[in-house]
């Protein structure tokens, strides 16, 4: 990617995604599961830009959504409703109703209470709700505690014994069809064993449900496969698929997989520019125009995104390397994008490009400190296209103007 030219053409901070990479990552999932019926439901939370979703739709992919906003996005981008699943620990009644109206494949149920609410809504509108239950296998995924989801202490899923009762209840209901089973133990997983242990545990539970006459047709193994940000071990997709296929041997089910990070993570770069520098007694700070509002992961999880320094000059002076912190302009000490990095002869105007920023980068960005969100571009067939323009400051104020007018009236009338 020609970062210097992209920065010149589109400005910074800028997210750039390689669509060929997204495509090849997605097709790799399809390939390893080709021996069985499978559906790859891309997890929108990683990056929900409509053009990325259109790429997934073109590859006949499905979608894993955690809000009705994501369901609408998926449908808008051309993903077929019957390939969409709706997960998430807190679905509102209106979201459940819209999901049922949209005829999505199923809702992943997260609690007894939610199951009863889905049933009541289905009954009220005389519908049959296809559901799957997210089972918490209580297995340690060995990842960062904020992205670990498969332990009993995490808020996600339902413990096996309770799940069994819910399946039996749903099976008898006139308004519920329990057609799937689901687990997802965490994100950025770098060890295969916990996933396979979970798959085996859930597969044997599935067999016990089928023995009760409950017709489970979809075996949803969640997402979670990690990528290499620094020097992490990565799981072989082939070994992963072989392990899952072995676990479900003898079960007549379609495999569903919900990858997010491993589809888009490596495809994305955050391109930023050095705006200033300062020296404290023991620390040199390189201040860039990107910040934690653009890429939250370093502040939130202490995550590493390799920063590449692109000097404006062709010749670098190699004698001036410094250990630096790369920080943004936001008023938080936690606003850093990299710490203790050795950089060479940095000058204002140079570019710092962060790697592996395609997942949980833009999708976690915010307007904190009234900063506009970055521009996003997609590179396809060697050509760059804007897939979301940079926000304008005026757009940030727009929704507040009506309230402002009312408040100004109130304040003026009180004198
Ligand atoms: C239920 C569920 N499915 C899929 C994913 C996607 O995970 P990843 O991006 O690690 O593949 C997540 C993310 O945490 C999730 O909670």
Image: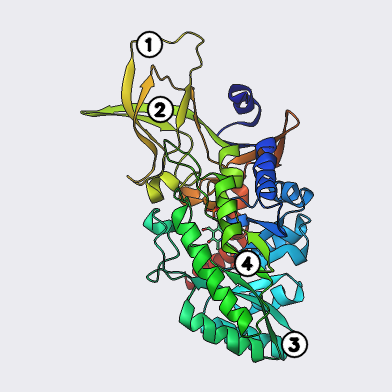
Q: Which mark is residue 219?
A: 4
| Of marks 3 and 2, the one in the foreground | 3
Where disc 1 sits, the SS reads loop
Q: In this figure, which residue is indicated by the disc labeled 3?
A: 125
At which x and y percent is residue 38?
A: 70, 58
The disc, 4 or 3, on the residue closer to the chain's N-terminal end is 3
Quadrant of the rendering where the N terminus is positioned: top right
Vertical placement of residue 196 versus 94, above or below: above
The disc, 3 or 2, on the residue closer to the chain's N-terminal end is 3
Give yes or no for contact between labels 4 and 3 (Cβ–Cβ under 8 Å): no
Mark 4, residues whose alpha carbon is within 10 Å: few (<14), some, or many (≥20)? many
Looking at the image, residue 39 sits to the left or right of residue 312; the answer is right
Residue 83 occupies which quadrant of the picture?
A: bottom right
Q: Nearer the viewer, residue 163 or 16?
A: 163
The disc, 1 or 3, on the residue closer to the chain's N-terminal end is 3
Instruction: Please say whether residue 299 is visible from this viewpoint.
Output: yes
Give yes or no for contact between labels 1 and 3 (Cβ–Cβ under 8 Å): no
Q: In this figure, which residue is indicated by the disc labeled 2?
A: 276
Mark 2, residues whose alpha carbon is within 10 Å: few (<14), some, or many (≥20)? some
Where disc 2 sits, the SS reads strand
- Which residue: 70% across, 73% down? 99
- Which residue: 61% across, 85% down? 212
Residue 335 occupies which quadrant of the picture?
A: top left
- Which residue: 61% across, 58% down? 245
Q: In this figure, which residue is indicated by the disc labeled 1?
A: 318
| Of marks 4 and 1, the one in the foreground | 4
For the residues labelled 4 and 2, the Cα–Cα distance comes to: 52 Å
């Amino acid at each position: 990617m020609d970062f210097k030219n992209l920065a010149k053409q589109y400005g910074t901070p800028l997210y750039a995604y390689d669509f060929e990479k997204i495509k090849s990552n997605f097709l790799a999932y399809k390939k390893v599961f080709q021996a069985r019926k499978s559906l790859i439901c891309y997890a929108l939370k990683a990056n929900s830009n409509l053009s990325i979703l259109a790429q997934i739709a073109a590859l006949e992919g499905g979608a894993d959504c955690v809000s009705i906003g994501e369901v609408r996005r998926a449908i808008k981008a051309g993903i077929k409703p019957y390939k969409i699943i709706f997960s998430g620990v807190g679905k509102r009644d209106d979201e459940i109703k819209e999901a049922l109206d949209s005829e999505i494949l199923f809702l992943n149920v997260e609690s007894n209470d939610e199951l009863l609410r889905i049933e009541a809504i289905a009954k009220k509108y005389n519908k049959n709700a296809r559901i799957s239950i997210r089972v918490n296998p209580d297995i340690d995924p060995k990842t960062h505690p904020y992205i670990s989801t498969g332990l009993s202490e995490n808020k996600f899923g339902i413990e096996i014994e309770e799940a069994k009762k819910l399946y039996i209840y749903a099976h008898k209901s006139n308004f519920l069809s329990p057609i799937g089973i689901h687990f997802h133990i965490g994100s950025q997983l770098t060890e295969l064993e916990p996933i396979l242990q979970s798959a085996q545990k859930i597969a044997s539970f599935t067999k016990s449900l089928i023995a009760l006459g409950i017709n489970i047709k979809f075996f949803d193994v969640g997402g979670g496969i990690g990528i290499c940000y620094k020097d992490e071990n990565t799981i072989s997709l082939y070994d992963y698929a072989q392990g899952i296929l072995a676990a479900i041997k003898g079960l007549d089910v379609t495999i569903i997989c919900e990858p997010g990070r491993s589809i888009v993570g490596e495809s994305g770069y955050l391109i930023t520019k050095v705006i200033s520098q300062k020296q404290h007694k023991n620390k040199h700070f390189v201040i860039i125009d990107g910040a934690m509002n653009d890429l939250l992961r370093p502040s939130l999880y202490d995550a590493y995104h390799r920063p590449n320094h692109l000097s404006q000059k062709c010749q670098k002076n190699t004698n001036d390397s410094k250990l630096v912190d790369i920080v943004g302009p936001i008023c938080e000490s936690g606003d850093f994008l990299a710490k203790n990095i050795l950089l060479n002869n940095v000058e204002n105007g140079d570019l710092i490009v962060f790697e592996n920023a395609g997942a949980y980068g833009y999708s976690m960005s915010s307007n904190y400190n009234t900063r506009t969100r970055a521009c996003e571009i997609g590179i396809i067939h060697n050509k760059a296209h804007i897939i979301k323009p940079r926000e304008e400051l005026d757009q940030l104020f727009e929704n507040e103007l009506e309230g402002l007018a009312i408040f100004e009236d109130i304040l003026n009338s009180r004198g």
